[in-house]
Amino acid sequence: MFRSLPFRNISGKPGRTAGLLLLSGFLCFFILFGSLVIYGLRSGMASLEARLGADIMVVPYEAATKKDLDGMILQGNPGYFYMDRSVVDKVSSMEGVKQISEQFFLASASSNCCSLAVQLIGFDPKTDFTIQPWVEHTYRGELGYMEILVGSDLNAFAGDVLTFYGSDCRVAARLEKTGTYLDTAVYASEETIKTLITEAKEKKLFNFGDVDPDQIVSCVLVDVADGYSQEDVLNDIKIHVRRTQAVQTRNLISGVSGQLVGVSDVIGGLIVVIWFLALAILALVFAMIARERKKEFAVLRVIGASRGKLAAILLQEALIPGILGSLAGGILAVGLAGTFCQLIESTLGLPFLLPGIPGLLILVLAVTAVSVLTGALASALSAFRISRIDTALILRGEN
Amino acid sequence: MNLRAENITKQFIRKRKGSNVMTAVQDVSLTLPEQGLTLIYGHSGSGKSTLMNMLAGLLAPTSGQVFLDDTDLYKLDDQNLSKLRRDHFGMIPQGQTALHSLTVMENVLLPYALFGKKGREEAETAGAEAYARELLEMTGISDLRDVKPGEMSGGEIRRMAIARALIRKPEFLLADEPTADLDEDNTKIVLDLFQAQADHGKSVLIISHDPTSRAFADTTYLMRDGLLLPE
């Protein structure tokens, strides 16, 4: 004897079931994929904000056009620029500056001397307040001379040896993903970067002329003290530290934030439209199914099915393909988002960070639930109508 | 058990004619015997099917009451009325009443299978599958047991509905035009089957405009313009 009438009805009508599966799958796929894109962009931006970590960046005047910084920070284009080290002391002595830390940038070459063409970032472990809090998530040791940390997008792991300008550097750890340019960079101590700059100079692969690595920095990161306005400190730096440009990191990403809001709004709007469309189509489909099969439901009443039983049968017939279709759509959405996250990032030109496994599971379950509930909601009216059918009139062919 | 209607009337509002009221059944009292075959015949539109639906607990009368022993059917809630129908009535409605996603055998066993694990346990205890095969044999469609209704004729589907109505061995068998799609031979087979049920202690009510049935009936009524007239 068969076990479940809804299952038999579903398997007995493969065309109708395939349509419901596709519709539920499409709904779940679109909502989840759209949500993942929005989530990825928002958390990418939050990650970028967190990783920039400083209130103000002071960089050489020549390299301070917003386009250069955007290219480095948002798209991860390797680059380097330098200014005199005296800037560090000047900035640190200014009123309202709580702490500062200098960084050194160097782009490795794509020739034989280097394993990878990446952005190399040097920091001073004694003063750094932006990179180390993040590094500590995966690496708590002290970064030694000629040791490096690699971003999560680079194909290198702890213990590997990478060569930059002919010098071997040992990978101490691979950092956790941020969804930003930092994932494609390599991090080293100030001393290591200075050695690499010297090596680059000797190999004539360094385009900044005859600079002394001990007398230069690439940027100074400033943390503004409580009670001081970032704008005031910024203006002071602009006035008193010559041949530099000070940039508020908040402003650096404000344009991108606006773009992000725009993209999120469009995707969010599309999700709402698709949801309403799917709800309407599903409701119509279930209404048609219920109408087409009202005599079958009348027969069930005759053999003793209660009104609640009829409603439950129709709801189950909606829920089963809804759950299966939504799960398939959800898996497809996660698979595609995971596979093409780099493409999404480069196409939109924005930081992109997918949630970790627990977050992803919660999102998948939540969206699947929304998709399944949409099917249930769409069938609810038909289920209610079916439960109120006038069996006698249907059997007489008058309804 | 005793199924009786006391002064039941059913009126319908004619939708197309404003508030005009159409009386389908008028002040009918009827007691179905615990055993025997009762026939109600009459022309189309005389109120036969409306009366049967009211007796089956499917259509509440405008006035009057229907009792199964001391239970007033229309004072029960839907859950209990449905259970009562399932436990005591076997009904053969008019027309084609098959579930098209199920085979003939599954359609016949539906009154058990519809109710999940409990229904399956009841079927097991009652030996329902063997009885279903027997019924298919008796109605002459045993070779169609694995066929779906879409491949069957109207008469075959009608015989399947009869087997389905009998599967739970109900005390009351209510059949609305059970021989409508059947040829002479099959009509006789079905009426013999109903008579055998009546002879084995069941109460069978046949609604029909087919005079052939009269020869099989223990009690006959004529329905005319909503009134039930004994013959």
Image (cartoon, rainbow, N blue to C red):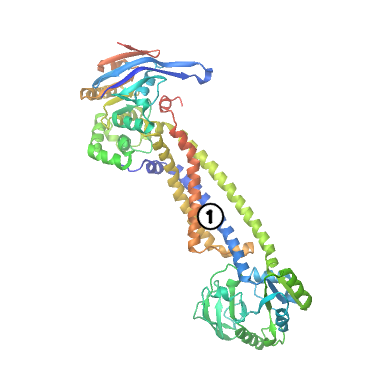
Q: Residue furthest front?
A: A227
Q: Is residue A104 left or right of residue A33?
A: right
Quarter holding residue B4: top left
Residue type for callout 1:
Leu
Quarter holding residue A232: bottom right
- Please state the horizontal and vertical placement of residue A376, each as a whole percent of the image: 47, 43
Q: In what element is the residue under mark 1?
A: helix
- Please state the horizontal and vertical placement of residue A378, each as a whole percent of the image: 50, 41
Residue holding disc 1: A32
Q: Is residue B155 left or right of residue A203?
A: left
Q: Nearer the viewer, residue A180 or B210?
A: A180
* Residue A223 visible from this viewpoint: yes
Q: Does residue A259 lie above or below A67 as drawn? A: above
Q: Residues within 10 Å of mark 1 (few under 14, many from 20)?
A: many
Quarter holding residue A55: bottom right
Quadrant position of the N terminus of chain A in the picture: top left
Q: Does residue A198 lie above or below B162 as drawn? A: below
What residue is drawn where x is 57% and y is 76%?
Answer: A132
